[in-house]
Amino acid sequence: MEELNLNQNLRWRQARVFSCKKRFIIVVAGRRWGKTRLALWRLVVNAFSGNDRVCYYVAPNYRQSKRIAWGVLKQLVPIEARCRSSEQELSIQLHNGSIIQLHGADNFDSLRGVGLDFVVLDEYAFMDPETWPMVVRPMLSDRKGCAFFISTPTGLNHFYELYILAKSRSDWEAFHFRTEDGGYIAPDELAALKAEMDGKRFAQEFLASFETLQTRVYCAFDRERNVTELELLPDAPVLVGMDFNINPMAAIVAQRAGEQIQVFDEVVLTNSNTAEMMGEINRRYAGRHGVVHPDPILAVSREKQARLWEKRISVL
């Protein structure tokens, strides 16, 4: 390895991530935690670790990549270690033949066709869901390259799904940090931000919560505390909470266990009707006794409500 100053004064949580040896690493962290600088440092060290390595940094778009990462990258790579540097291509070539280049995920064609040793996907939650499985992942295959995902959450999207997947794979590691864990934002500033912002927005941006902002019915719902493995009770009635909307037509499926109502399934049908919903529930739970609890709210007259209920009850 060429001479590289390894003293970057990483905070201990950053050092913990930096020292992780897994091939695929996901870091979910709040705003201003220090995600990008840590990721770029991993990128630079990887480029120095061998000859002719190809290392990419990818942001949601090209302009963002230049604005966020290019200046930091030039700070991290010593001038004497550079063979060539291009402001136009946002690339640095080292004397050992390794190349570091910045890209945007908004242009798939600029990414394809190159084998990678290391890639950073910065703010992956805000990229096209196909960026990783269809474009970047195949680029790592021939060189058995590594990937480093960093992002603040934005709902339960593809980044959340990858974070959950990482917890069950032996060659993946997933980390989760709040903004305060980074140590860069003073406690009084965080307190001021919390007072100024909507609670859900603050939770997403600074607590790195994966919860959606607009569609939560139960604001106190916590996936870590409220989701667990369930034992289905074969003799208990299937309880169906059903919304008679058309698109989507939705239902939750639950069971009563002592004093608890345990929800264990959901059914969502697009452009559907009551008969199709009941057919799907019967298919999933054939032979089980069921009780349907419908949503009674209808923005129509009482007379029309009565006719609609008569029709739906006959279907049920």
Image (cartoon, grey):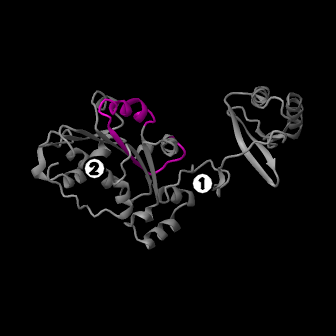
Left or right, 198 with respect to 253, comes to left
Q: Which mark is residue 270?
A: none
Q: Secondary structure at mark 1?
A: helix
Tell me, yes or no, whether the two marked residues, 2 and 1, touch with CB atoms within 8 Å. Answer: no
Task: Give the vertical position of 257 relative to 195 (above or below).
Answer: above
**Image spot of residue 301 (x, y percent):** 84, 39
Residue at the bottom extreme of this rendering: 188
**Image spot of residue 142 (x, y percent):** 31, 29
Q: CA distance from mark 2 to mark 1?
A: 33 Å
Image-quadrant location for residue 147: top left
In the foreground, 179 or 7:
7
Image-quadrant location for residue 33: bottom left
Instruction: Give the residue at x 56% y 61%.
Output: 199
In the foreground, 192 or 58:
58
Instruction: Give the residue at x 53% y 47%.
Output: 155
Q: Which residues are magenta?
A: 128-157
Instruction: Give the residue at x 71% y 46%.
Output: 230
Mark 1 burial class by Cα count in 10 Å: few <14, some 14-19, many 20+: few
Amino acid under disc 2: Ala
Amino acid under disc 1: Glu
Image-quadrant location for residue 179: bottom left
Q: Is residue 129 magenta?
A: yes
Instruction: Give the residue at x 39% y 61%.
Output: 13
Q: Which residue is mark 1?
A: 224
Left or right, 86 with respect to 235, comes to left
Q: Is residue 117 magenta?
A: no
Mark 2 burial class by Cα count in 10 Å: few <14, some 14-19, many 20+: many
Q: Which residue is mark 2?
A: 69
Q: Earlier in the sequence, mark 2 or mark 1?
A: 2
In the foreground, 262 or 187:
262
Count of labels shown? 2
Q: Secondary structure at mark 2?
A: helix
